[in-house]
């Protein structure tokens, strides 16, 4: 990606972060009294010393906390129960739905999807998403393939709201998605490989540096152009 594109995305992200400080104040209050440890919007967690392990000491009545957990668990069990198959698949074309061969193929595809979901971390991450939905009113779930090469399964991630930012188009559909993560040089190397990261990151890892670095992950339109 060109330096100009990088600078444009960073500028857009910084503007999104600046515009969201007001709602983050409300999310911090929700996190403090209803969803402990799910927010921490303004806390700097580049080191373990920045983590406030006693954040829930402000809670003197657990009614809201328990109600939140019960609501999230109820949604999880009702919509995407981990103990039963909660979806099925069919063709849009009624002609194909009347074909025994086509229906048999679709049933096999639905079974494959079900087993892949069962083998993945979907149930764990969707539970976090329901917690965010019940607490903050919104949640984000991303899907990636497993390790490169042979099929490595599905990998779901419930992105913490603290890390997630997005821009919408005129239809209120997400146009650009940003995620700011804080990783050590070793985490960056294990994610992208030594050939795809700056030399400074490789050097920091060789020196044993464990300081966390801001990494901006972006999803944005590329006009159907294959990027390498």
Image (tube, grey):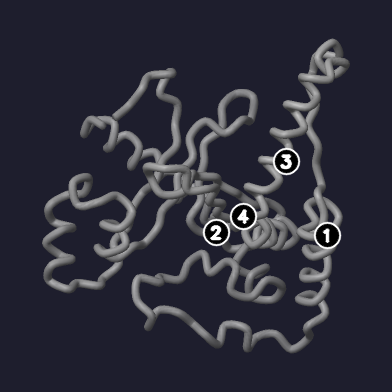
Separation (CA) of disc 1 from disc 2: 22 Å
Quickly name the residue at label 4: 119
Query: With respect to residue 208, does 84 lie above or below?
Result: above
Label 1 close to label 3 by CB (< 8 Å): no
**Badge 4 element:** helix
**Badge 3 element:** helix
User: On the picture, is 78 further left or further right than 137?
Assistant: right
Choose top left, top right, bottom left or bottom right for residue 157: bottom right
Sequence-wise first label, 2 or 3: 3
Q: Residues within 10 Å of mark 2 (few under 14, many from 20)?
A: many
Q: Quarter holding the C terminus?
A: top left
Numbered disc in front, either 1 or 3: 3
On the image, the x and y values in percent for residue 53 come to: 52, 85
Separation (CA) of disc 1 from disc 3: 20 Å
Q: Residues within 10 Å of mark 1 (few under 14, many from 20)?
A: some
Label 1 close to label 2 by CB (< 8 Å): no
Residue 136 is at least partly visible in this image: no
Sequence-wise first label, 4 or 3: 3
Quickly name the residue at label 1: 77
Sequence-wise first label, 1 or 2: 1
Judging depth in this view, the residue of 101 and 224 nearest the camera is: 101
Quickly name the residue at label 3: 111
Mark sitting on residue 51: none
Separation (CA) of disc 2 from disc 4: 23 Å
Judging depth in this view, the residue of 161 and 103 nearest the camera is: 103
Q: Residues within 10 Å of mark 4 (few under 14, many from 20)?
A: few
Numbered disc in front, either 2 or 3: 3
Quickly name the residue at label 2: 160
């Amino acid at each position: 990606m060109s330096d100009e594109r990088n600078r444009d995305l960073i500028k857009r992200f910084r503007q999104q972060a600046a515009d969201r400080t007001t709602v983050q104040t409300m999310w911090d209050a929700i996190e403090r009294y209803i969803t402990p440890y799910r927010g921490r919007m303004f806390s700097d967690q580049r080191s373990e010393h920045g983590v406030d392990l006693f954040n829930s000491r402000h809670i003197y009545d657990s009614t809201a906390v328990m109600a939140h957990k019960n609501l999230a668990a109820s949604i999880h069990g009702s919509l995407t129960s981990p103990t039963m198959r909660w979806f099925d698949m069919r063709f849009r074309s009624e002609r194909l739905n009347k074909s025994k061969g086509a229906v048999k193929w679709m049933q096999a595809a639905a079974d494959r999807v079900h087993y892949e979901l069962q083998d993945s971390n979907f149930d764990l991450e969707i539970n976090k998403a329901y917690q965010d939905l019940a607490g903050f009113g919104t949640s984000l779930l991303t899907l990636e393939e497993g390790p490169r090469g042979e099929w490595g399964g599905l990998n779901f991630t419930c992105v913490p709201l603290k890390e997630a930012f997005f821009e919408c188009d005129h239809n209120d559909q997400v146009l650009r998605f940003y995620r700011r993560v804080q990783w050590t040089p070793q985490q960056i190397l294990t994610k992208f490989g030594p050939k795809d990261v700056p030399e400074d990151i490789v050097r920091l890892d060789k020196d044993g540096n464990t300081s966390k670095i801001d990494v901006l992950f972006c999803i944005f339109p590329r006009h159907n152009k294959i990027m390498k």
